[in-house]
Image (cartoon, coloured by chain):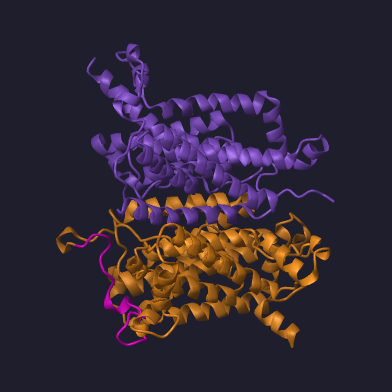
Chain colours: A orange, B purple
Amino acid sequence: MKDVLKRIVFGKKEKYWWMTAVVPLISILLSFIVGAIFIKITGRSPVLAYKLLFGASGLFPGPYWKSHFAEMLLSSSMYIATGLGFAIAAKGGLFNIGAEGHFIVGGIAAAYLGYAQPFAGLPKFIHLPLIFVGVILAGGIWGSIAGYLKAKRGIHEVITTIMLNWIALYLIEAWLVIGPMEAAVETGISGTPYISVSAKLPKIFAGTRLNISIIIILAVTFFIWFLFYKTTFGYEIRAMGHTLIFGMEAPKAGGINVERKTIQTMFIAGAVAALGGAFMVLGVLFQYPPIFEGGYGFDGIAVALIGQNEPLGVILAGILIGALRTGATTVQLAHIPKTFPSIIEGFTVGFIALQVLIRYWIMRLVEGRKKAIQVDMGGGAK
Amino acid sequence: MNNNIPFLNASIAQALDYTAPILFAALGGVMSENAGVVNIALEGMMRFAAFFGVWGSFVSGNAWVGLLWGIGIGIALGALHAYITVKWAGNQIISGVAINVMAMGMITYLLESIFKTTGYSPPVAYFGAPASKVHLTFLKGIPILGAFAELTILIWFALILVVVLHFVLYHTVLGLRIRAVGENPHAAETLGVNVFKIKWFAVITGSVLAAFGGLALSLGTLSSFTNSMAMGKGFIGLAAMIFGNWTPFGALGAILIFACAQVLQLFMQGTATGFAKLIPLGFYLSLPYMLTIGALIGVVGKAVGPAADGIPYEKES
């Protein structure tokens, strides 16, 4: 039973199957402790802050729970998208910092297909799928540039994805949005024109902003899980990921076309992260504004790391980050800026970077001091 | 014709002002990555130092104290990055992401809790004040050289640092050891080099240099901290380091090319006609990053980093 559970939930072989779950949990816990100390030092009340933060997070029933819960799922769907973007690439041994770029590329594609004339008159059940095809292609192609450069030229994807993020940002916000895609002056709108009614995501929870984005992303996550753990295609990518980091030739020798797989992996990663941008435009903003409130891409890295790059983990971590961000709007009542969750998030990522140390502590607890020297080094993106 | 000289000099001085923070960040990257530790946290380190510099200057009323506070936080962040990546062989990218995310949240928090403002700090004593600048009055009337007549001490320090860092990396034993550790740590270890010590040193020094970049923004160009700092300047520094082939002079050259793109953009905006006017602003802004990818592909020059860059070092037992 334990073995079956282990394979379904974690899909990786480790000496202690629960380690994958315990390391992020301890990291989160430590971060909340550090966060509390930080609040205390600056002369605020940590108890009040956390009470407000979780009270409005949508995780627990309370006043206005319905709207908090809806807002939480709304933002979680975007964090899950960018988190998956990182996790998918990590499965293939690639370090994708590009989710920020994929996110805005998806956003601009959704905005354009949402308002542009030949499409804007179509019925919803044709228009929406059409937009998503466009978004997936745009994000996927933008993602596969980094994959191509890695596969054919051997350029490290961390560098190219960072550069491509900025290229995407400037080309979109300093060209498209203020140039070819700018709304006509007489409409008085800054940014792109608003999308047509047929492009808006249907709402699923009356009286709130919650729309089908959460359902779409849960379906996509299931699809990704199936792809990676139940198909040869996914197995090959994981095989590549397990060995790529050591520079081994095994997958190549085993008949896997590593170059093509790298490009394909980055295509999927880019496409999924781009969905997040589409959710933002089609479900929240209804246009591409002059300046996009960014950060979802970088937070996606945190989501994936906290979720240990596993589909289920990414969902849980996405909901956690979504909840913290939703609750953060009320911590201002305790005189704490709403960027406070970034501190928790930053520390959590920091502790996950230190996972060798955390694993060492856990091993010492479980096995006593002597054996812990042979630390289990598994896990992590790289 | 003579009227153009002050204008030309002012433009160059402005370009130097743009150059200094990026140059510091790039040099910080050069230092750290030559010892084999990738640092994508340059941006976050700049943000931390920019804030702490202003804070120190605010508390004491003295820009030099602010400088010390900035250096202090640079050392602390460098030690954190080194503790994670060198001591515990943690992933260097993840550690960098952690510092960047922390910088976003923590600095906004401190800004609001210390100065009780959102978005910007009150003005403080800074190095850009006319009295604090380095005056070389005899250069004033000369074309081009006149740009150097009134610069902040931080700009001078950045320019001198390029030469110093080049000398240290390529003409001293320490530099040889740093580069050896970045190229082949196991071989260096065999020759009796303490790999961990060298990495700790390089990461902390690199972080302090990045901190100077932040200080050049908040205490050099401006006299206060704004919440949008460092506005991606750390990442341009990272790009410049790569474009400049992981060398100090290369990084300087890269930034000068990037600065030209900026100047060109301003010039084109004002005067361009016909085809040149069709080139959008976004193109000039994204040019540094396109050039960097071009350099890596081999289209624009050639960029090859240290062989063991980014690989955590663990002793063979």
Question: Which quadrant: the N terminus of chain B?
Answer: top left
**Within the image, what quadrant is residue A62 found in?**
bottom left
Residue A162 is situated, as x and y percent measured from the top left of the image, at 51, 51
Q: Is residue B205 above or below residue A95?
A: above
What residue is shown at x 45% (from left), y 43% (from top)?
B49
Residue A367 is situated, as x and y percent measured from the top left of the image, at 80, 70
Label total for image? 0
What residue is shown at x 61% (from left), y 69% (from top)?
A26
Report the magenta stretch's main SS. loop
Q: Nearer the viewer, residue A127 or A186?
A: A186
Residue B56 is situated, as x and y percent measured from the top left of the image, at 41, 40
Q: In the drawing, does residue B275 fall left or right of residue A275?
A: left
What residue is shown at x 61% (from left), y 72% (from top)?
A310
Q: Nearer the viewer, residue B168 or A56?
A: A56
Residue A18 is situated, as x and y percent measured from the top left of the image, at 69, 76
Q: Does the magenta portion include B81? A: no
Q: Is residue B160 above or below residue B35?
A: above
User: In this orientation, does residue A343 appear?
Assistant: yes
In magenta, the rendered stretch is A189-210
What residue is shown at x 31% (from left), y 15% (from top)?
B140
